Each structure stands twice: as C-alpha cells, then as structure tokens.
Image: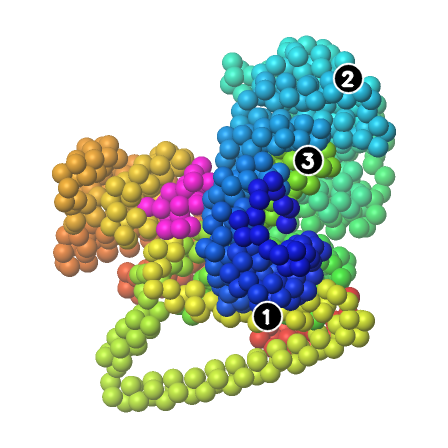
Amino acid sequence: MASGGAQPTQPLPSKEAGLFKQVLRFHESKQYKKAIKTADQILKKFPEHGETLAMKGLCLRNLAPDSEKEKKEEAYELVRKGVKCDLKSHVCWHVYGLLYRQDREYKEAIKCYLNALRIDKENVQILRDLALLQIQMRDLQGFVDTRHQLLTLKPSNRSHWITFAVAHHMNGAHELAVQVLQQFERTLDEVPASEAYEHSEMLLYAASVMAEGGKPEEALAYLDKRKDKIKDRSGLAEMQARLLMRVGRKEEAAAVYRRLLAVNPNNYKLHDGLRAALGLVPTAESGGVLSEEQRAALTALYDEMQVQFPGNSACRRIPLDFKVGEAFKAAADAYLRIGLTRGVPSLYVDTRPLLADPAKSDAVQQLVESYRDSLRKSGAYPPLTGAASDAPPPAPESPQTLVWVLLYLARFYDRQGRWQEALALIDEALEHTPTLIELYVAKAKILKHAGDLEGAAHIAETSRRMDLQDRFLNSMAVKALLAAGHCAAAERTAALFTRDGEQGANSLYDMQHMWYEVAAGRAHTGRGPQGAGPALKKFTAVVQHFTDIHDDQFDFHSYCVRKGTLRSYVAMLNMMDLLYGHKFYSRAAGGAIRVYLQLHDKPLGAANGADEEAQLAAMSPEERKKYKLAKKKEEKEKARRTAEEKEREEREKREREKAAAQKGGKKGNAAAIKREPDPDPDGAKLAATPDPLGEASKLVEMLVRHAGDRLASHVLAAEVALRKGRLVVALGAVRKAAAVAEGGVAHPDVHGLVVRLALAVQNSPPEHAVVRSVVDAGLTALLGGSSPAHFAETWRAAHGGASLAHRLAAGKTMVLLGAAGGVEQQQVATTAAVAHVMAEDLSSKPHDHAQCVEVHQLLGNEWGDRQAAARWQAACATAFPHSRYFGGARLMALSPVYDFNSMREAFGKLSF
C-alpha cells in the first residue's frame, strides 16, 4: 500500500507505527496471515485505528475464497469500520476501493478512489489504480484527465507518455495522441538496444493513429522517415501498402503487395490487396460483377503467379472464384485432381463456397462423377477438360484415389439432400478402405442430416475409438451424442481430454468449452421440463465465461503498455467492446432466455401437477390404479439408476484422485482435487427462480445492446416484453426485428410477432392515452393499415407457400386469430391451419429434419390433430427414409456394443 503525501489523521506511537509499516510490507509480499497477526497487535491497543482495520480487512479478503461469503462479509465489515473511524484517511478509502475492485464492483471502486484523491490529490498509486478502472469501464474522458495528471506528476516516466497518448486515441482525439507521441519521441536522445522493439512498436502505433485520424499522407511520410528504426518489416510493408491504396498510389501499393507475396504467397489478404491495387475487383457501377476485361486480366495475373509459385495452392484456388464457364471447369478440373490424388481431407470444405453458384455446382458435380466413373472403369482419370485430342491418356491412379473421390461425391450429395446415394458411396468406400477415419466422420454427418441421430452417434463413436488420442474425433462424437440426447455419455466422453483428478464438468467449465456447453444446453432443453435446470446451468456457464473474459482484460491495461505492444492493446480494447456480440454469447443467452420463457409459461411444479391431473381425470378407475403402480415402479427404477450413477461417479472420482497422486502430486492436480463442491450442480436453483422473466430481461438487454444486428435478439426481446405486458417495448422490438430481418414484415418470425402484438393490444389496450396513440400508430404502420385478420390472410396469400417455415408461421397465426374469436372459430382455424401446413410437398426439395419434427409435434401435441400428425409422419418417413424419429424404411442397424447409458469400459480406464 503506497503512502501518499497526506499526514495520517490518527497518528500512532513509534512502536505501533513501525508495526503498521510491517503490515504494509507483509501485504505487499502477500504474507497475509503475518499481516493480520501484526495488525491484531496494533488493534489490541488502538481498536479503532481506521487504517489498521482497513488493512486487516483487505488481508482477510485476500485469504478468503470467493465462495466463502461469510469471510468476505467480515472483511467488508472491517474495512467499513476503518473508513467510519477515519473518514479523512486516503488509505482507508483506497483499501475500500481495492476490496470492491477485487469483487469486480468497478463503479463502487471508482467512487472510493475519488474519495481517496480528495484527501490526497497527488497520490500516484491511487491515480494509477483509478486510471486502470476508468479504461476498464470505458470512462474515456476521465481516463484522459487521470493520465494527464499522472504525466504532470511524473513526466520522466515513459509509460505515462504512452498511456496518455492511448487515452487521447481511445477518446477520439487522434491529433492530440500523435502530438503526445511525437513530443515524447523528441525527449529521447538515443534508444537503447534493449528498447528497440518497444520503440519500433510505438512508431507503428503512431502511424496507425495518424491514418485512423484521416491523415494517410502524413502517416506515409512518418513511416518513410523512420523506417530504419522499425523492426517489424512485414508489418511496416503491409501498413505502407494500405496507406498507398488510401492515397491513390495504387501502382506503388501493387509493387509492395507483390514483394510481400513473394515471401508468403499463401496469405489471402495479400492477394485481396494486390487485386484491389490493380483494379481487379467488382465496382458499385458494375453491380458487384467483374467485367470481361477484369476476368482476362485476373487470368493473366494468376497464370503468371502459378509459374512464379508452382507449388502454391492459393494461386490455384483463387482463380476458381472469378473464372466462369469452360474456363472455370478447366481450372476446377486441375485443382480437384491434385487434391483428390493427394488425399486432402479438407478439399470439400475448401471448395464448398463455390457450390453456392448453381453453374459452378453443376460443373463440379459433372467433374467428380466423371472421375468416379472413369476410376471404376479404368483406374485412371478421364482426359483433362480442354486437353488436346492428341494428348497422352492420364496415367493410372492409386486405388486410394477412388476412395477420396467417393468421399467428396458423398459429401456433395449430402449437401443436395441425396442421402441414400451419399450413404451408398460411403459404404462402397468403406468396403475398400475400412480404416479411413474420414469416411466414418462423413457418414456420421450424413446420417445426422438424414434424420438418424442415433445412428450418427454410433458411427461417430466408432470413429472416436479408432484414434483415442484425437481430440477432433472426440469432439465429433460428443456433438453426435448430444444431438441424439445422450447428455451424460457426451459429458463423460468430453471429460476424457480433461485433467486427471478433476471432475469432467468442472474441468470443461475451466477450459471455457463453449461449443460443448451450448450444445449440451440445447440437448437438455429438448428433454422438456426436467432438462430446464441442466440447460440453464450450461447456458449461464457460457454467459459467465464472457464476463470473465471481459474482466480479464484488466490485467492487460498495464502489461501491454509495459511491453510496448500498443497496436495489439488497442485491438484488444476494440475487440472487448464487441465481445458480447460474439455468436457463442448470442447462442447461450438466447438458449437461456428460451428456457426462462418456458418456465414462465409452464412453471415446473404447476406444469407437472396439471398434466398429471388431466391424465388421471381422463382415466377409468382401473387405468388410474395401473398408472399409479407403473409410476411407483418407475420411481423405484429411477432411484436405483440414480444410486448406481452416484456410485459410479464416486468410483471414477477415486480413480482420478489416485491417478493424480501417482503422477507426483503436481500443483495443478492438487488444486483440482481441492475444488469446492458446486452448490447447484444440476441447475435446480437456477430453474427454481421466482422471476424467470426478470432473469430473461437481463440477458435480453445485453443481446439487444451488443447483438442488435441479429434477428433473434429482437425476437426474444419481443417475446419477453409481450409476456410482461410492456406493449411499447414490444412494439419497439418488433419494429427493430422487421428492420433487421430479410424481407422485413414478410419474414415468418416477424409476421407472427406482428399478429401477436396486435392481438395483445386488442385484448389489453394501454390505459394512458399517449401510450395508446404511440402503440396504435406503430401497429398501423406494421399492419399496413389493415386489421390483424386481413393482414394475416394477405400475408398467407403472398408468402405462405414460400417455405415450410412460412407455412408454419401462417398456420400459427390462423390458430391465434381463431382463438381470439372464440372456441368454435378456433376449431375452424385449427383445421384450416392443419390443412395449410399439410399442403407442403416434402418430395419437391430437401427439408430440414428438425423443422419437420417441430411440425409433427405441433400437429400432434399443441393442435391435437392425431390423424394429421400421423399423415405428416408418413410423409416425412418417405422424405427421410433414414429418420429414426419418423420410422423410415431404411434405418441403419445399431451396434449392440454401444450402450450409451452404461459405457463403463470406455470411461476412466483410457490412458492417453
């Protein structure tokens, strides 16, 4: 704890003053127990000495784990008492702020620091701590002021100059930031060799600030003058190339890009820069399409580069993006043959973007099918596209080439929804080479798309067991298990790659395994009410990961400046500002919101009780008796399985601890074993929240603020607002959803929200006249001035047949409008909606299996039309013959070896 210039308001005698200095030294050296013991010696004689009380509280907090709330509260009480006993002590206020900072209560910590600075205005340590919190909270003007004060107090400190410039940069004052850096540069006589890299980074940072501030010419001149002092030669060249482009000196930029490509021809960004410098990119005037002259120039450019870099794949792959017609087919032919002959597993993923163009997709299909036919017949490729008639025939290929051709074609057919043909090709390849793992991975994906989730899990497990040390195969198996609903087996499988001596769930959380947690949360959501708690546990874990990542930036505010990595530091700050817009945060927060909405619509206890009462009421006395006996038997079986599972987990835990101890008791393993038990391992407390809409609202606020460009954010915001009866908020969310959605109000999700909002206003119009006028005006604009019924009918006529999602949205609104008109009208509307949805022709094009399952459940459960559900199931069984859910006719036989509920031989006994 640094002491400032202010005199203590509670001076101690010399002996106790010496003891207090020892307390400070013990704290700085992290000897907290000794510090507390020494503080107690002072407090025996001076029990109300504020600074000693505060320091004791701080040391006590440092010793207390985050999970021990009682010790944390005791520490706060001591510090509060210290502040109360000595309100005019900057040490007490500083310690109070440190306590809040440790618990991530940054706003409260800033208040405490400001109080400390009112007492000791020039305390450098407090000013530094305040500056760190200000940039953490993005109080940019306050950050500038604090850094200016620090620079004034310590002008000889290099870091104060640098951070003052960064403060101006982040605050948008680019010119002032450059002036500060240049002024600091003038104070340097000669840069020591040990600081050459840091100085080089500062120069590049200054140039980037100039360019960002709209002065590319000055930035170029600045770099040219100081190029001998810059150590990052490639970074310098790339920055010069970008700046030359901005000032219109494209020939010079092209020359720089060519030099860079000579060093790294695989860098696609450099290829993009070269094409832009040569003017070989689509323009707005051309409608985003390359002209024939540009295509010819690009062809000549890459022909030249293929000669210059003969073994480079980027120079062969990029022409496939701009070539068309026969030129594309010839280039694709040459490119595909190389990848297939070499057995490149990523070839399909590499060329998949080309398949979005129907003409290119057809050309690729013709090529690969011709390879298959020719290799089957003669063992060689057909002649190259465009080859001369007198060219020698292609040489015979290795038999393995046919396997890779079959794999590529199977994945191609999978994309087209031709699953039967794709599986036939995979099976043919497996007969030839049953040890090729990529074939099993592809087969698992095809089965998943075809609707056989259980079969996909079995095949993925087979591929995993072929190489137990491959983390990718383990992840594929985990995904397949989760999709099939085997949540416990998936967790055990994922835990195979965690640390010894640690429970899988804990280690997966520490590893911030977000894709797994999101997938597991979705799998638990599909289990119904009993999966609400585990689903929330997984989703909120991901949300907490992002909070931790955001808080972790705190350590870099001083580190990056000290190391001189200024460009990376500013990039990190900008990335952190966009952190909560990441797709994983949106998926996890969205999943948690949907679970909270389900809990609001059907509370756990009430839903289960109501469903059981309805079932019992519909039964005869004999049926009720049988039901109760069966339920009692089921509960006993469930208790038995739970006991076995608990025993197995305890056994595996003992095995992990034993294995960890045998490895020598490493620090990491010991820390893992001592972990505090999770007070809510299954998320039961999360699911038992008394205010699910309140919890959902917190997440919705973050989504709308940080992921407002995503339709799902505004759809969820509208769902929450409608349930809370906040019609103005719901109107705003629906309008934003219409603005973001492709097609606006024509989007099926937006259409359903508009109708529901209109009905909500009809049923419960706002009481306040101003609010009513605002909502009415907004609804009129969304409905186009028509009634909800007319709007829905018009929309159904115009868009209802566009896709299955559109039909589903139209059917739901028909039922809603029927319910609003009365029971009889609801029955008519339900019948009409069922007929409308059933009109979908499943044989005309490939459909999403999950969406077809949703329609089946809607028909049979929510709308209660069992006959329609049966007809839909029959149609889907024809469209998805491999679907286990719909009972298709071509189900894969499952291996009896894989019992995912008791795979004991695979877990806890594998050594990696």
- Can you say whether 121 is above or below 513 in the image? above
Q: Residue at x 59, y 70 (%)?
A: 676
Residue 840 picture location, percent across and down: 36, 49
- Give yes or no for residue 241 being in the magenta stretch: no
Residue under label 2, please give it: 226
Q: Mark 2 and mark 3 in contact? Answer it, CB < 8 Å.
A: no
> Are there few (<14), some (14-19), or many (20+) residues within 10 Å of tag 2?
few
Give the Cα distance between marks 2 and 1. 55 Å
Helix, strand or loop for disc 3: helix
What residue type is disc 2 on? Answer: Arg
Foreground disc of the pair 3, 1: 3
The mark tally for this picture is 3
Give coordinates of residue 24: x percent, y percent: 66, 54
Asked if the residue under mark 1 is in contact with the one under mark 3, i.e. CB atoms within 8 Å, the reply is no
Snapshot quadrant of residue 229: top right
- Disc 1 marks a residue whose amino acid type is Glu
Q: Amino acid at mark 3?
A: Val
Q: In the visual, does 377 lie left or right of 362?
A: right
Residue 902 in view, yes or no: yes
Label 3, residues with CA under 10 Å away: few <14, some 14-19, many ≥20: some
Q: Which residue is mark 3?
A: 561
Q: Is residue 705 magenta?
A: yes
From this viewpoint, which residue is outermost toward the front?
13
- Residue 511: x and y in percent read 64, 57
> What distance separates the C-alpha of mark 2 from that of mark 3?
21 Å
Residue identifier under label 1: 676
Give the vertical position of 630 relative to 167 (above or below). Answer: below
- Prevailing SS of the magenta stretch: helix
793 left or right of 706 in image: left
